[in-house]
Each structure stands twice: as structure tokens, then as C-alpha cells.
Amino acid sequence: MEIWRAPLEFRRACDEARQRGARVGLVPTMGALHRGHQALIEEARKRADFVVVSIFVNPTQFGPNEDFSRYPRDLEGDAKKCAEAGAHGIFAPAPADMYPPGDETRVHVGATAAGLCGVHRPGHFEGVATVVTKLFALVGPSIALFGRKDYQQLKVIERFTRDLFLPVEVLGVRTVREPDGLAMSSRNAYLSAEARAQALAIPRGLSAAARAFAAGERRAGMLTALARGHITPVASAIDYVDVADAETLAVLGPEEHTPDRVLLAVAARIGGARLIDNLVLGEDPSPLGPDGSKEGDEERHG
């Protein structure tokens, strides 16, 4: 499995793969890979002949008081996980490679990025859009896979890919969860044992709302209250618990009634880590199953 550091070497490898008749699949990551990332690679292998993983902790999507400097980095361990999942190569550039001296161009994003995390992380999605556009420019015509845990990120990427006519098919892959329902995330590494147990309030809250939705509840305020009721006692801060349109991400007011497919999204700080999760109610299964009980499948998707 090759590791490319230079952007133009990575572009050349992707071009050569297409010249051989291969379909290229890209899995963009910031490293600290886990089973969820491996599921993306495995899904890419089903859909593409030449699968590459980018590993780059992107500085432009971190705010001044966020965790850029301490974000976990383990290229050697990540390479082993990529190989296990069947990737053909890794693109692991340095920041100066992706943002060379004199760099000044950014990709502006619009309404899809404005709410939810956009409120609490100003500039974040502009950084995401910029680095992903750079990756798409390097990889060329391809398929790119992203996890639905970062649902707003997925929708932002889908939007600018369409708007800019980029030659990439963007696919969202279901969230991979631990057996107890917690969404897999690189930031889970920040959690102490106590905070890890407290973080289960998030899938419990989502599951409570999902059960109510399945029973016919359509009041946005009631759905968010059910989720908040579990999360508030353990969170040091809650950025949002919102119900939003599953495509535009426009947030619904508490008195509004939802359609039969709607996003319920959460961002909360527990044990020093900012954790996000979501369900598309009416589409995604509950993290804890229809009756709220744990399931034992280690690779359950939600």
C-alpha cells in the first residue's frame, strides 16, 4: 500500500488508475481511524477498483480555541487499519502542501452550513469545503464516501459538489455505532471511563425521540425535549438539540409539526469532548433498537 505525501504524486496515481480503466474511490479523513472509517473503506471497495484514503488534520476547519493541536494523530496505526480494510493507498500531506505559501483562496458556503454546527463553529464549514474541494481537484473523477454521523458536513459537501460541477459522486454511509449505541468518533478517545458512560445519554435521547416519532409524535418541540431530557443532566454544555429539514437543514420551531422524514441532530460537550450525533427520523433505525434495549451487534449501523 502506497503512501503519497506530495499532492501532484497523489494526482498522478489517481490519473494512472483511471487510465488502466479503474474507478477511483476516495475516503477523506483526519486520521485517528476507527471501525467507522474502515466501514467507509470497505464500502468504497464495493464500488470502486482503486480506493485511496486521505489523512490530513485540516487546520482551516478548526477555530482558535478548538482541539487542532491535540487532535489524535497516528499515521502508522492508521495505515494498518487502511490495509486491513482494503485500501490501495494513503494521501498524507503536510499542511504546507495543502496550503502553500501565499495561499489565500477559500470556498464560501451558504445556507446549508449556516445553522446547527455553523452557529457554534464559525468558519468551520468554509475550511471543510476548501480542503475537500482541493482533494476533489487532486483525485479527479471519482466516488467519495463520508459518514452520516457528520450529517451537516455531508449535506454541505453534496451542495458545493453540485454547485461547482465537481466530477465526484458523493455518497453518505450510515453511522457505525458501538454495541451500546454510542456513535464511533475519533474524539471518543478524549473521554474518561466516567465520561464515556455519560456519553450514552446521547443515543438514549435520540432513541427516546425515535420511539415517540414511530408512535406518531410530530411536534418538533416534544421530540427535542425528549432527547434533551437525557442529555442535559450529563452535559457540561449543549450547543444544540434541533429538529431540521433533512435536506436543507432549516431548523423547525418548537411549535412546528415535522414531515414524516426529518433530522434530529445533537451537539453536546461531555467530559471535555464535543460530541455530535443525529438520526433521520423516519429513515434511520434507533441507536438502541425499537424498544430502547441494547443490541449486541458490534457493527450495528444507525
Image (spheres, rainbow, N blue to C red):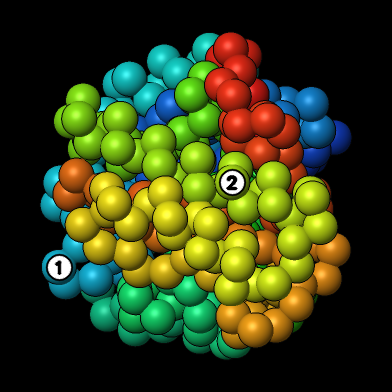
Residue 192, image x and y in percent? 18, 30
Mark 2 sits on what residue? Answer: 208
Residue found at x 68% / y 30%:
291
Element assignment for label 1: loop
Tell me if residue 296 comes above or below residue 242 in the rendering: above
Left or right position of 56 against 59 = right
Measure the C-alpha gap from mark 2 to mark 1.
33 Å
Answer above or below: position of 287 versus 220: above
User: Residue 162 falls in which quadrant of the image?
Assistant: bottom right
Q: Residues within 10 Å of mark 2 (few under 14, many from 20)?
A: many
Q: Amino acid at mark 2?
A: Ala
- Residue visible at 45% across and 19% down? 81
Label 1 crowding class (10 Å Cα cut-off): few <14, some 14-19, many 20+?
A: few
Q: Is residue 176 left or right of residue 259?
A: left
* Amino acid of disc 1: Asn
- Quarter holding residue 292: top right
Where 9 falls versus 150 (above or below)? above
The residue at 65%/72% (across/down) is 220
**Which of the marked residues, 2 or 1, is nearer the chain's N terminus?**
1
Res 61 → quadrant = bottom left
Residue 45 falls left or right of residue 249: right
| Residue toward you, 62 or 161 | 62
Which label was assigned to residue 65?
1
From the viewer's side, name the closer residue of 93 and 292.
292
Q: In this orientation, does residue 175 appear?
A: yes
